[in-house]
Amino acid sequence: MIEFISQPWPWYVGGPAIALIMLGLLYFGRSFGVSANLRTMCTIGGAGKVASFFDFDWTKQIWNLVFILGAIIGGAIAHNYLTLDPGVDLASNTVSDLQGLGLADPGGEFVPSALFSWERLFTLKGLVMLVGGGFLVGFGARYAGGCTSGHAISGISNLQIPSMIAVVGFFIGGLLVTYFVLPYLLG
């Protein structure tokens, strides 16, 4: 039983599950997005006194906070109790490309400690990649009016043109970083 649980769910289970959740959100007049939780938490902390962006009724977003809490708890349970192998099954071309960029064991860990660790953070490249990248993701989510999950799942499900444009921009940005920035940061 554990072996079945530790495997990724197939698309024909995950896809319809996402569709059912989106239909439920549409029915109740809600939209999904993870970055909206940051705004809600800042509002709870009193940021509405400083900036009008945070001045809204945060109690209407409690369901989204519960969702993100469930995602964190579910991830912790899956990682600590349902994962038999901490590695990731990568395509052989991806493994050879990552080894060419200097990663010793691509796919050996779900979150590679060679990239994401305290030791890596305190290097110039690590600071640029983790802190600079985090800042750019936060800025991009605010500038685009939502994060990748909100636009790609909720926005496209609602056939919103701005979300479709944002998702295309996310992919173009990801490709540019992958081919032009990542080789420098890993090299």
Image (spheres, helix red, strand yellow):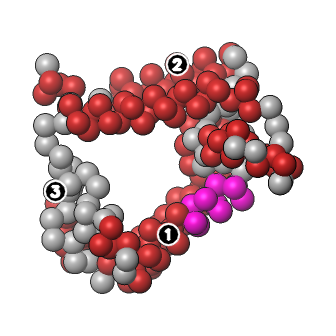
Examine the rendered structure and indicate whether residue 8 appears above or below residue 141: above
Q: Earlier in the sequence, mark 1 or mark 2?
A: 2
Q: What element carries label 1?
A: helix
Q: Which residue bears the numbered disc 3? A: 108
Q: Earlier in the sequence, mark 1 or mark 3?
A: 3
Pick whichever, 91 or 54, lies toward us.
Answer: 54
Badge 2 local density, few (<14 within 10 Å), some, or many (20+)? Answer: few
Q: Which residue bears the numbered disc 1? A: 131
Of the two numbered discs 2 and 3 in the rendering, the one whose residue sits closer to the viewer: 3
Residue pictured at 44% horizontal, 33% vertical: 71
Q: Give residue 110's position: percent from left, percent from top.
A: 25, 51
Pick whichever, 77 or 25, lies toward us.
Answer: 77
Q: Give residue 143's position: percent from left, percent from top.
A: 72, 59
Amino acid carrying mark 3 in the image: Gly
105 sits to left or right of 72: left
Tell me which corner region of the image, top left, top right, bottom left or bottom right, holds residue 31.
top right
96 sits to left or right of 186: left
Q: What element carries label 2?
A: helix
The quadrant of the image that shows the C terminus is: bottom left
Report, in whole angstroms, how far the alpha carbon at label 2 lies from the one at label 3.
Answer: 34 Å
Pick whichever, 103 or 51, lies toward us.
Answer: 51
* Magenta segment boundaries in residue numbering: 135-144
Q: Which residue bears the numbered disc 2? A: 20
Tell me which corner region of the image, top left, top right, bottom left or bottom right, holds residue 107.
bottom left
Badge 1 local density, few (<14 within 10 Å), some, or many (20+)? Answer: few
Q: Give residue 122's position: percent from left, percent from top.
A: 37, 77
Amino acid carrying mark 2 in the image: Leu
Report, in whole angstroms, how far the alpha carbon at label 1 lies from the one at label 2.
Answer: 36 Å
Amino acid carrying mark 1 in the image: Val
Residue 4 visible to an observer of this rendering = yes
